[in-house]
Amino acid sequence: MHKVLLLAILIFLATDMPLPIHTSPERGSHYDMKHFVNTTDPIWTYKTTNDGEIICEVDQMESITQVDIRYQRLFLMRRKRIRFIFLVCRYEIPLRGQFYYFHRDRMTVTSRDMAPMCTEILLYQARDMSCAVIKIKSLTERGDARFDLRIRNSSIHAKLHGGCHNFFYFHVGKRPVYPLYKPTCQRVLKRPK
């Protein structure tokens, strides 16, 4: 009886320890997603590998706790109407991001009613917190992960941090990159009348 209990305890402890071999996944990193998103400063998606009709995208924090963040994702979407005439629509999506104690570099994004959407993994962040490179894995669709270069609004007009730029293009490889931010995107932050 005691041998079985001891064996069960050893197996439990061994499965929670990372293996010191190359095939073992990294257990978190020194980057902290909660630390990067914990700001009242809007965070823009500056560039992405996601090819869509979105032309401006920004996240605005509403509240944050030890376990989650509630925020609004605002974006403009271009819709083709007639021939070359485009209609641009503004959208607001309320989201929730859940943080993890053992994987501080990531958060799971859900709708407010807890429908899973994606996992965002912080691959790199500038020391001054001005920008970050984020890998996004969908929880609802199969396919490749996408990469975003995100920049805080207070740093959007400053020179882009070299580390963010280099790290983003290192992970993107030969994939096409789509710029989402341009100065006119600031109008997304203003509530429509």
Image (cartoon, grey):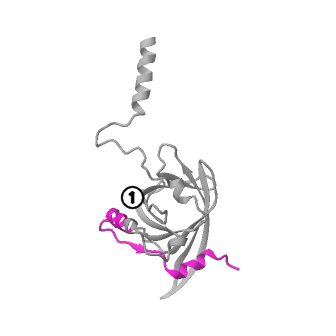
Q: Please check the rendered image and state whether residue 188 is part of the magenta-colored stretch, yes or no.
A: yes
Residue projecting furthest to the front: 128
Q: Nearer the viewer, residue 4 or 81?
A: 4
- State the image coordinates of residue 142 (x, y, percent, origin top left): 41, 56
Answer few, some or many: residues within 10 Å of disc 1's Cα (few below 14, many 20 plus, some between 14 and 19). Answer: few
**Based on the displayed image, in which of its 4 quarters is residue 59 positioned?**
bottom right
- On the question of residue 133 being in view, the answer is no
Residue located 49% across and 66% down the image:
130
- When the figure is inspected, residue 68 is found, relative to residue 47, above or below; the finding is above
Residue located 49% across and 79% down the image: 182
Q: Amino acid at mark 1?
A: Gly
Query: Does residue 177 show up magenta in the picture?
Result: yes
Location of residue 190 with respect to 111 vertically, above or below: below
Residue corresponding to mark 1: 143
Magenta region: which residues?
A: 165-193
The N terminus appears in which quarter of the rendering?
top left
Question: In the visual, does 166 lie left or right of 80?
Answer: left
Quarter of the picture containing the C terminus is bottom right
Where 35 sits versus 158, above or below? above
Provide residue 22's location: percent of width, then percent of height. Answer: 28, 43
Residue in view at x 46 percent, y 17 percent:
5
